[in-house]
Amino acid sequence: MNDEEALPFRALGDPVRSVILRHLAAASGEVGARELADVVTVGQPTLSYHLAVLREAGLIERRKEGRHHFHRIRPEALVKLADFLETGLLRGPGVDAQTTA
């Protein structure tokens, strides 16, 4: 696994980011930053930091409308993670075909 592939997993390693991602996944569309602030128990600067980490990991997208920011999950990123968990782990270093059969 290279650094780029590991980035989403590192982003999910923080409990606050996991809660944010779960909330976005359960939403039917975009969620405003104010709503997310009500979901997690951190201040606005800390929330902004966590959202930036999730964006940089490619897990969420942000849309700005004036002073308001709206976030949504990137389903294709979750599919990529699921694919890695299903097949990538079996193709990792030190794993041969007989081990996975």
Image: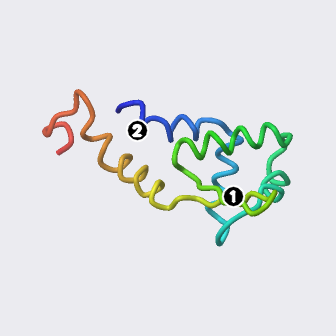
Indicate the position of residue 73 as horizontal and vertical percent values: 58, 59
Residue drawn at x 42%, y 36% is 4
Q: How many marks?
A: 2
Q: Which mark is residue 101?
A: none
Mark closest to the chain's N terminus, 1 or 2: 2
Indicate the position of residue 83 as horizontal and vertical percent values: 36, 53
Q: Identify the residue position indicated by label 1 in the image.
A: 23
Left-right relation of 73 to 5: right
**Outermost residue to the left:** 98
In the picture, the quarter occupied by the C terminus is top left
Task: Look at the numbered disc 1 and give the secondary structure of its residue.
Answer: helix
Q: Quarter-wise, where is residue 42 in the image?
A: top right
Left-right relation of 58 to 64: left
Amino acid type at image mark 2: Glu
Residue drawn at x 72%, y 63% is 31
Q: Residues within 10 Å of mark 1 (few under 14, many from 20)?
A: some
Q: Quarter-wise, where is residue 29 in the image?
A: bottom right
Left-right relation of 85 to 31: left
Q: Residues within 10 Å of mark 2 (few under 14, many from 20)?
A: few
In the picture, the quarter occupied by the N terminus is top left
Task: Look at the numbered disc 2 and give the secondary structure of its residue.
Answer: helix
On screen, residue 70 above or below 86: below
Indicate the position of residue 53 as horizontal and vertical percent values: 62, 39
Q: Identify the residue position indicated by label 2 in the image.
A: 5
Callout in the foreground (1, 2)? 2
